[in-house]
Image (spheres, coloured by chain):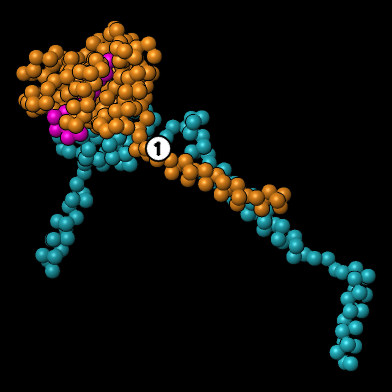
Chain colours: A orange, B cyan
Amino acid sequence: MKRLIAGLPFIAAVIFGGFFLWGLNPDRDPNEIPSVFISQPAPKFDLEAIPGLETPGLSRSDLVGNERPVVVNVFASWCVPCRAEHAVLTRFVEREGIRLFGINYKDKPADAVKWLNDLGNPYERIGSDLSGRTGIEWGLSGVPETFIVDGDGTVLFRYVGPVVGPEAVERFTEALKQAGALPSGAAS
Amino acid sequence: MRQLIFACCVGLLPFAANAVEPDEMLTDPVLEQRAREISKDLRCVVCQNQDIDSSNAGVARDLRLLVRERLVTGDTDTEVIEYIRARYGDYVLLKPPLEPATYALWFAPIAFVLIGVFVGGGVLMSRRKQEAFEDLGAEDENTVSEILRRNEAGDAS
């Protein structure tokens, strides 16, 4: 009994030390918000096209029945990181051949059209989410966010924040490969 | 002096201001009150440590509007919270639900208090026992007096 009591501080130190060690892990992001949609069906939504843009609107049915998983990117012209991410996504579409759909989150149509005209439009379809309601349906916490959706409408992957920088691009590429969203990597 | 008091009152105004803007509020005071109560239990996913009732973030405003919209369509409080929980997960609840995954969270404090009482009590009890010592036996008494006597004799010489 005495030994047990004498050993308690040591045990407590080991437990707390373990927590501290876990907390020191640089890969751990304490701000990460778990997504409920991973491996769950994508939410229902039906968005009109952006007025003044030829790209058609986006609804859930567009995400279902595709040969390969598709990428859904939530963006806005007022979102500065989206501008940096735009170049990355364009490269993914042009070089890797991913299919990219967009949700234009709480954006003035005129601003969105100008933004896409200036930077180019890599999106196959873009839905205009003026009210932000579709954003809530997707459990959005901010823009940009990027999802990979399987052919049966299941959400496979969610990336919060801009896919910018080598680490983020690598993580996203890995997710695309695993999902089989890349034409060449479909077998892996 | 009067000016100073006025200035203080004006200075306090911003603290009285609320994140809930007038255009969001429902005309029905009962529903509005329910909406406020629900909003206080929902986490703002942008600011993360604030409820949506007091947050000025855009998403928080959208969620407040959504809460009110659901209430107007006749949802119960639980249904509204479940609706938002289905989209944002348990994370959106400021008070985590009691589930196997959260048992450690809910019961660890109680367990620690119990361990503390148990260990602390144990230590105190064992100390009290030590204080109550028994009388020396006849043999030990003899030895002690023998030593004392010898010491006295030694001092005298």
Residue at 29 percent of width and 32 percent of height: A166
Q: Amino acid at mark 1?
A: Arg
Q: Nearer the viewer, residue A73 or A34?
A: A73
Using the image as rendered, state which of residue A39 and residue B40 is in the foreground. Answer: A39
Could you tell me how many numbered marks the image carries? Answer: 1
Q: Is residue B53 above or below residue A4?
A: above
Quadrant of residue A177 in the image? Answer: top left
Task: Say whether residue B7 is visible.
Answer: yes
- Whether residue B96 sits left or right of residue A119 in the image: it is right
Q: Quadrant of residue A109?
A: top left
Q: Residue B141 magenta-drawn?
A: no
Residue under circle 1?
A28
Image location (x, y in percent) of residue A156:
35, 19
- For the point 17% across and 52% down, the residue is B13
The chain identifier of the residue carrying mark 1 reads: A
Read off the magenta span. A70-81
Spot the residue most to the bottom.
Answer: B157
Relative image position of residue A8 (x, y in whole percent): 62, 49
Q: Estimate the x, y position of residue A19 in percent, counting from the top left.
A: 49, 43
Q: Left of B71 or right of it: where is A118? A: left
Does the segment drawn in magenta span residue A79? yes
**Front-most of A178 and B157?**
A178
